[in-house]
Amino acid sequence: MIGIDIISIPRMKKFYKKHGIKGYNKFLRKEEIELTRSPKTAAGFWCLKEATSKALGCGIGKTCSFYDIWIHKNKLGKPYITLSKHLIEKFGIKNIDASISHDGNFAIGVVNILGSKTKVDLSH
């Protein structure tokens, strides 16, 4: 399944100005905050988490929280995602591909999830 999300970077800058690092704690883990050097990066991370929840078909909420999704970066800076054990088991996750892009005032996150329980039911 594919998930996508977009956010205005100025919106994230306004959020940071109002709430600071404590605001980031609402959707980022400590390790993710350490990777976040600017509101631009935080905006990209927000998008990836939202895109992941959308790809799973549940959105952020009771089934999937921001803390069920971990964002990391490899040596080249490419983002990759790990999920909580309960999400992996619930959705039968096999693989996740992720990408973040920034252009002008926008950040976008795209996620492709392969799993045994993430298929859409077209029978109705």
Image: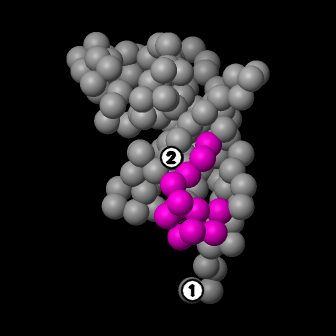
Name which residue type carries label 1: His
Residue 69, which numbered label? 2
Name the residue carrying label 1.
Answer: 124
Mark 2 or mark 1, earlier in chain: 2
The image position of residue 80, as x and y in percent, is: 66, 38
Q: Residue at x 35, y 56 (%)?
A: 61
Q: Nearer the viewer, residue 35 or 51?
A: 35
The residue furthest left is 18
Q: Quadrant of the C terminus?
A: bottom right
In the rendered image, residue 64, in percent from the top left (x then y), is placed at 43, 57
> In percent of the image, x 58 and y 56: which residue is there?
55
Is 109 within the magenta? no
Q: Nearer the viewer, mark 2 or mark 1?
A: 2
Q: Left or right of 106: which side holds 116?
A: right
Residue 72, located in which quarter of the rendered image?
top right
Give the distance between the C-alpha atoms of the residues marked 2 and 1, in whole angstroms.
31 Å
Q: Which residues are magenta?
A: 81-93
Residue 83: within the magenta?
yes
Out of 10 and 74, give the one closest to the viewer.
74
